[in-house]
Amino acid sequence: MKTVLITGADRGLGLALAREYLKLGYTVFAGRFLADYALLDDLAAENPGRLFPVPLDVSDPRSIDSAYAEVSRHADHLDVFVSDAAYMGGPENSRIRGEEKIDPALMCKSVRVNALGPLLCVHRFLPMLQAGEEKRLCFISSEVSSVALMLRDGDFRYCMSKTALNMAVRMMHNALFPAGFTFRLYQPGWMRRQMPDGSLYNRDDRQIDPGFSAARAMPVFTGRRADEGRLELVDYLGSVWPF
Amino acid sequence: MIAYLTNCNSDFARALRERLLRGGHEVYAGEALSSLSSLDLFVATEDERLSGDDFTVREEIDPEIVMRSVEENLCAPILALEAALPALDKGTLKRVCFITSGAEASVNWSEKTSGYGYAMAKAALAQAARICCNRLYPEGYTFRMFDPLVGRVPPELAAAAAEEIFLCSRAYDPDNLRRTDEARFVLRDALGREWPW
Ligand SMILES: NC(=O)c1ccc[n+]([C@@H]2O[C@H](COP(=O)([O-])OP(=O)(O)OC[C@H]3O[C@@H](n4cnc5c(N)ncnc54)[C@H](OP(=O)(O)O)[C@@H]3O)[C@@H](O)[C@H]2O)c1
């Protein structure tokens, strides 16, 4: 049995990735965070015994412990870990010369959820991942994590948290690649937001569907490279971004 | 020239303060910010490697150490810049400097397996500083990201390098504004080397 744990799978890209892994025959543990979204329940009903919603707040070690206990009731190993959960929040309070003062509590929250959360999850699930055959760790980052290509002049909070994520992934890669783990850092593109009824909110015609980005991610997430020692940030078009 | 160091807690910061004073500059630190009506050089000297921030992903992770490092190495310097802006606006040099580490905070180069709190905070600081730079550069502000190579280069030598790097202008081609080094956001260390992000 192939198994995957996906964080932040209530909607959007996380939910779409759960669907993709189901198609490939995986048993999916889908991190649940949102109270007002039932899309995961629908998917679980369509896939009895193959998709398990698991309550998971990646910023809370006790919640990660509970999720670990829950997942280990159904499986003795994890092949793949996918970190999708992210706190985006609004753009407010993280702009130099902004209308509002910079809010350090929100800066901290962004790093806690978006960078520290994935590290805590990998640490906690390491025994199960170690027992898995694939040992594949995938992280959803963003093009705004790139310092080299950063052109924005405001709203640094979310961007910097994804840079911190890249750093954490680099350090995990340094430690775990020699132990047989392989890594993916994925920039999913600008995606439409999924509403509780499953519909997609279109703010701009350039936005892509999370399902499209998830389908593009799969060859990246499941494929093998000849040069796995090289950590790269790759986007949904297959292009590589500099850090 | 009027310089402001956010604190003088480290050997490097103290050496830099000495050096700037010997160079005939006015140097202030810490609480003195509120009394400054104008400011030329701003240096966020926060560079805190906290005890306990030394676990690998395989060992017990202390999330609160990571968050304290984020508060001290990331939030504090950015909030200090925000607070110093009114004085910097009135100064002439408008130079903003942050302390970081290439070996520990470069996503490209890091070979570390521990020190997550420091590394994540400083990597994030680079991005936050870059975005602030994008906002302020058109107003005449210029930025320096500097690695004093703590533990490798003696603080006095690092301070000498910092003084040069913080105060000197970088290449500028009046006939082609795209050929100006100040427009590049770079990290340089005490040996003058540039580190990738
Ligand atoms: N959408 C884009 O255009 C875009 C672009 C580049 C990268 N990305 C990245 O792609 C991933 C998926 O994006 P998406 O558009 O599908 O976003 P999404 O629909 O907002 O999904 C992310 C989910 O994570 C949840 N979450 C927040 N804090 C959490 C926590 N502590 N523990 C567990 N879950 C938590 C969010 O809940 P709340 O809404 O309640 O916070 C949200 O449901 C994210 O990592 C995002 O940063 C998105």
Image (cartoon, grey):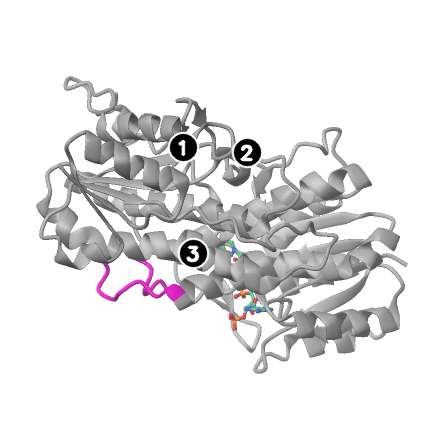
Residue identifier under label 3 = B72
Q: Looking at the image, can residue B68 be seen?
A: yes
Q: Is residue A180 magenta?
A: no
Residue type at tag 2 = Asn
The image's mark for residue B108 is 2
Looking at marks 1 and 2 on the same chain, the residue that comes earlier in the sequence is marked by: 2
How would you classify the magenta stretch by its main secondary structure? loop
| Picture coordinates of residue A84, whole percent (x, y) | 61, 59
- Near mark 1 (Cα within 10 A), the count class, few <14, some 14-19 or many ≥20, is many
Picture residue at 35% right of the left edge, 62% below the top: A91
Upstream in sequence: badge 3 or badge 2: 3
Residue A145 image point, x, y percent: 48, 46
Is residue B174 found left or right of A177 in the rendered image?
left
Q: Is the C-beta separation of discs 3 and 1 under 8 Å?
A: no
Tag 3's secondary structure? helix
Q: Which residues are magenta?
A: A90-104
Q: Numbered disc 2: what chain?
A: B
Label 2 residue SS: loop
Q: Are marks 1 and 2 in contact (CB under 8 Å)?
A: no
Question: Residue type at mark 1?
Answer: Pro
